[in-house]
Every structure is written in structure tokens, then in C-alpha cells.
Image: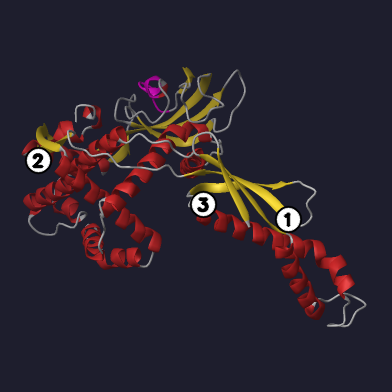
Amino acid sequence: MQVSVETKEGLERELTVEFPTSDINGEVNTRLQSLTKTAKINGFRPGKIPMAVIKKRYGGQVEAEVLNEKLQQSYFEAVNQEKLKPAGQPTINMVENDDKDNISYTAIFEVYPEITPASLEGQSFEKANVTIGDADIDSTVENIRKQNQTFIEVDRAAQDEDQVVVDFVGTIDGEAFKGNEGKQVPVTLGQGQMIEGFEQGVKGAKSGDSLTLDLKFPGDYHYKDVAGKDVQFAVTVLAIKEATLPELNDEFYTKFGITEGGMDAFREEVKKNMQLELDKAIAARLKNQVMDSIMDVNEITVPKSLVEEEAKNMAEQMQSQYQMETQGDAQLQTSLFEDQAKKRVSLGMILAELVKVNEITASQEVVMEKINEMAATYENPQEVMDYYMSHKEKLAEIESFVLEEKIVDWACEQATVSDKDFTFTEFMNPKNEDEA
């Protein structure tokens, strides 16, 4: 087998492979000979079919199978011989020539870039220092009450925080569009469930009112066919319902597993859960800083094929989620995810090299500790543990998570880490995310 490699633009390589035709002829004859014993053809007794008949009936199919197998085998042998690391699947093209004694083909593919991870010395990170106060617990308790509120029908005009039940029909230039109609849709005023202007237009209406709302879809609306277009909604108000918050009593506490200790025990449980979420958020913030820094100091060329594949996967995942939430079938363009996909692929390759170079490992003991920690937050911890241990892909996710935590530890040892104080509200509130 003769092999040559040509370096194309960027990470692209063109591999040319040539091997003797005799390499496949012998295997083709062996398989055809075997078929003379097992094939069933009308007019011939089993095991008595002439080779000429077998060749005519199966020759082309068998030759194609053997050639395909030889192409795959020779490709991997050539790649190993030339010490190449292909990224993605190759494009195989047969080379036409008059040499009947040899078969030639080219394989075009990208290779993984050579990465030498840079040091993080001189980099600086901020670790959030957050204390949960009584006022933070008060606010969280109030949010829990709102999450468990009920709605009671009232005979008055709709106002903010009311739930308004409506029928609506939307038209664009007098024509219907996909998803333009809703029946008995509950809309809580002030929550931004509907496009801008809808909830404000319904505010002040009473049960039985019919309204016409002239609005406009946002330019970045997820359903591209209507994005940025003027729309008219004919709305019928079916009911106005007022929110009623549950009382803080033993019956309410029991819903959250608190059977003793009343308000004090409930607040302690709330604080415990707040701390768990806070710890996750603090770790995530530090991790994001580390990952951004790793990307900044390690600029690499990324294989286009891997970016395209990742963008495709992201689009399919988002499409699946969108269909589950809306029952829609609008197709999401892969190009929308290219930038994020490039960042994911780049970071993944850099982290893999960091793990290798620095001999960072996720021991089984540490992985089990992480699974135990996660399982402890569920009602049946053992069931959660069994689930992870019986699903290799889920176990691999935990292992990756542990490795990322260890990379953060490694980064913090190299860089300068300083504390920054935050209140619980400003740290956890998305509106203050830039400050945090």
C-alpha cells in the first residue's frame, strides 16, 4: 500500500492511498465460492450452482462490499502510518486511471490541531462572598407563596397580577398563520407571557369583553415566518381571576416536608435550599471566569467539521425542546448556533489537552462523592444513585463535571483569586448578572 499526504488550507489534509487490485480479488472469489454452497436460485439445486451463475447474480454486490471494507481498512491503516488525527469523517473519492492492477483513492479530512496549553499565571479571578440574611429568606418565602398561589374568579376589571382567561385569533394582513389561535388561555398580567402590548391591552377589561389589539411580533421572534410583522388579535375575555396567596401555617409547611417546628423549621429548610443554590451559583461564576480565561490564553484553529456537527446537534436539541413546548414545527437554522458551537468545540479540545498534560483525573471515589452529594437533594437518594450507576452516559457526565471542577482548582492555584462581597439579591438576580 502506497500512501502520500498533502497539506491543504488550515487543518485540511488530502490522503492519497493506492493498493493492488489483487487485495480485493482474492476476497471476492472466496465469498463467491462460499455463495455457491449457500445461495438459493430457482432452477438449481442447493450447492450445485455454477460459479458463472453466482458471479452474474452476486458479483457486483460482493465486489462493492469487499471494496468498501478495504477502503475503510486501508484508510485507518494509512492514518495510523502517517500519525494523523482525523477530526470528523473523511470525504472519499476514487481516482480514475488506466492502471487495472491498482486501486487509488483520496480521503479529504481535517485533523485536530496541535495544542500546547498556556499557563494561567498572571490571570486573576474573583470569588463571590455572599451571606444569606433574614430579609433574603423573607423574600424567598414570599416567592414560594406566589409559586403556590391560587386564582379565584372575580367580577371586576383586570389588573396586574390577575389571571385573565382569553380566547384569541391572530391575523397578519387579514390572513391566519400557524399558531394564531388560542382557546381558554390563562394569561397572568405583568409576567410577559405574551408578545409586547398583549397583556397591557387586556388590562382593564372585564369578563365578556371583546377586544381588538393591533400589535407587532418582535424581530427576533422564534417563529421566523411572523417575526417583525404587524399582527391583529381579536380577543374575547372569558374570566378575570384574582391571585390568592396561601397562609403560612402547618398545612402549608407540610407540603414541603416540614411536620415539626413550624415557621422556624420551614425558614431553616428554605435557607438550606437557598444555600445549595447559592453554592452552585458561586461555583458556576468562578468556573465561567476560568473557562473564559482558558479560551483567552489558548487561541486555536478549530476543525470546521466538528463545529458544523456541534451546531447541528445544538439546533436539533433546541428544535426538540421547542416542539415539546409549543407543538410547532418551525426549523431552526444551524448557522444560528455556529459561534456557540465553535466555542464549545474549542474549549472541549483545550480542556482535554489540559487534563492530559497536567494528569488531572476523576477518581471513582470522587465521582461517587459527587453522585452522593447530588442524590442527597432528592426524596429517594438510592434510586438516583442507581440510575447514574446503571447509565454509562450519565456517569460520564458526572466524570466530566468532576474533571471541570479539578481544572478550576488547578487554574486557581496558578492565578490570583480575590474575594468580592455581594448581597444575596444582587448576586442571584439575573438583572445584576453583569455586576456579579
The numbered dot on residue 82 is 3
In terms of sequence position, does the residue under pointer 1 or pointer 3 come before the other? 3
Q: Amino acid at mark 2?
A: Ile
Residue picked out by circle 1? 102
Question: Horizontal placement of 79 versus 281: left or right?
Answer: right
Q: In this picture, which residue range is highlighted in magenta?
A: 199-207
Q: Are marks 1 and 3 in contact (CB under 8 Å)?
A: no
Tell me residue 149's x, y (percent).
26, 41
Tell me if I can see residue 215 in this picture. Answer: yes
Residue picked out by circle 2? 132
In terms of sequence position, does the residue under pointer 1 or pointer 2 come before the other? 1
Task: State which mark lies toward you, 1 or 2.
Answer: 1
Q: Residue at x 29, y 47 (%)?
A: 354
Instruction: For marks 1 and 2, give the CA distance.
Output: 76 Å
Q: Residue at x 80, y 81 (%)?
A: 37
Tell me residue 163's x, y (percent).
35, 33
Q: Secondary structure at mark 2?
A: loop
Question: Horizontal placement of 149 versus 330: left or right?
Answer: left
